């Protein structure tokens, strides 16, 4: 937790693959971690009042209106019209 915000760090099982993801994993030192090839690391910002505990399961809802996507080549936002 940082200040009044609460963050959850977890992995999602399954394979996601692209040259950019492979390069980012290598740059971040994650390519050699056990299981890194079959899982994706996710960080979720939660309401500070959320009733969640470390190591416990929690149901999360993805608010797709808050997703930010960027062009990997030029960095231009793909979500701004």
Image (cartoon, helix red, strand yellow):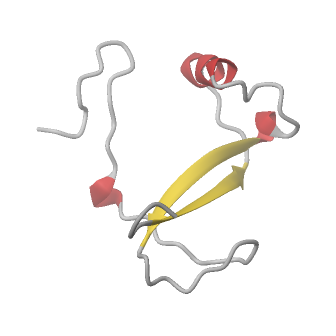
Q: Residue furthest right?
A: 34
Residue found at x 64% / y 25%: 28
Residue found at x 49% / y 82%: 50
Q: Nearer the viewer, residue 10 or 48?
A: 48
Q: Quadrant of residue 21?
A: top right
Q: How many marks?
A: 0
Q: Position of residue 51 (x, y in %)?
A: 55, 86
Vertical side of 41 occupied by 78: above or below: above
Vertical side of 33 occupied by 76: above or below: above
Side of 78 where 2 appears, left or right = right
Q: Quadrant of the C terminus?
A: top left
Q: Quadrant of residue 80?
A: top left
Residue found at x 50% / y 59%: 44
Residue found at x 23% / y 40%: 79
Q: Position of residue 57 (x, y in %)?
A: 70, 77
Vertical side of 75 occupied by 60: above or below: below
Q: Residue furthest front?
A: 3
Q: Position of residue 41 (x, y in %)?
A: 64, 46
Side of 35 where 47 appears, left or right = left
Q: Residue furthest top?
A: 73
Vertical side of 67 occupied by 44: above or below: below
């Amino acid at each position: 937790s940082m200040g009044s915000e609460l963050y959850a760090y977890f992995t999602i099982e399954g394979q996601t693959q692209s040259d950019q993801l492979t390069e980012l994993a290598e740059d971040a030192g994650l390519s050699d971690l056990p299981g890194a090839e079959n899982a994706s690391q996710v960080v979720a910002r939660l309401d500070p009042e959320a009733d969640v505990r470390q190591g416990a399961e929690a149901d999360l809802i993805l608010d797709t209106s808050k997703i930010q996507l960027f062009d990997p080549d030029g960095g231009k936002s793909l979500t701004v019209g």
